[in-house]
Image (spheres, rainbow, N blue to C red):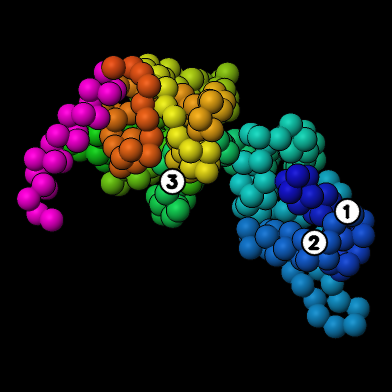
Amino acid sequence: MRADRLVATLLLMQARGRVTAAELAQELEISVATARRDLEALSTAGIPVYPQPGRNGGWSLLGGARTDLSGLNATEAQALFLLVGPAASVAPEAKAALRKLVRALPDTFRADAEAAAEAVVIDPARWGEHVKERPEMVRRLQDAVVRRVKVRLRYSGRGRGETERLVDPLGLIDKDDIWYLIAGTDKGQRTFRVERIKDAELTGVPAVRPADFDLSTAWNRVVEEMEQQRSLLAATLLIEERFVWVMQDRHGRHLEVVGPVDDGRIKLRLTAPTPLMIAQNLAGWGATIEVLDPPSVQAELARLGTELTSRYSGTA
């Protein structure tokens, strides 16, 4: 796990004062290229790790080779925890490493470092939709989470127009390159899709953070609620085996492979909130997919087909 390696790299540099990528690779049993990438990642994150060229060169941690990590200032400690923190949400080993690292920090840095480590969760499972670019808004919101200050959001909800809300930012979620903010509001905990946040103003007013709040637990609750909403209806489909991977890539956990049938096709089970949503996802496949049930999805597909035929039948 990369988070473990980054922590081990930092501690090794503090113990020895200077290391080469080759020495680090041998110590951690990784390739030299991987060791070099890890060193560059620490440096890019703002941690004072610098290469020193020359015959006796290598990489060193400026500020003192101290195993108690007091060579890091508050900003540098935050940078480290922001870098390795997300992995703790998906790897128990990384979480254990972070706990040890927190105890090694000076008392005055611990609160901010813990907040930085808990500011982001990465959920590797997909919901079908995929966005490549991360919004610039994430950095600002992440800063608000770490600094624990209220944020005034200008938010464009689906079908509700723009609203202004004063929220207590609790944490950020990276869901397949789509970012979400979990925040406390006057109506309870809410989840905001970052790409719909038009503006975010850090107020400087201290945010309210529940003492027992855990970002991973909160996100799991959001996922469970979303899964229930998205799985209200199931359709049974038949498709050629060569297209199954495309359906899996597009629909993620909402698609279940039931198994092969007598004619060689594969039976699938697709879930969504409504018959129309399933039909809209399948209409583009034409006769490649056969919907066995329910009749409500079949009816929606027939309606969509009739609409398209009516509009475009005379244009060919």
Query: Disc 1 or disc 3, which is closer to the eye?
Result: 3
Q: Amino acid at mark 3?
A: His
| Res. 175 visible in picture | no
Say which element carries label 2.
helix
- Along the line of sight, the residue nearer the viewer: 258 or 221: 258
| Disc on the earlier residue, 2 or 1 | 1
Q: Given the current orientation, which residue lies at the most extreme front position?
A: 263
Q: Amino acid at mark 2?
A: Ala
At which x and y percent is residue 49?
A: 74, 64
Characterize the local packing of mark 3: few (<14), some (14-19) or many (20 or more) Cα atoms within 10 angstroms.
few
Q: Amino acid at mark 1?
A: Leu
- Along the line of sight, the residue nearer the viewer: 234 or 50: 234
Give the magenta range.
296-316
At which x and y percent is residue 13?
A: 85, 58
Tell me which residue sits at (72%, 63%) in the image.
Answer: 37
- Along the line of sight, the residue nearer the viewer: 34 or 313: 313
Q: Which mark is residue 130?
A: 3
Q: Which residue is mark 2?
A: 35
User: Quick check: 118 above or below 22?
Assistant: above
Instruction: Tell me if residue 308 is in the magenta stretch.
Output: yes
Say which element carries label 1.
helix
Tell me which residue sits at (35%, 45%) in the image.
Answer: 195
At which x and y percent is residue 307?
A: 13, 36
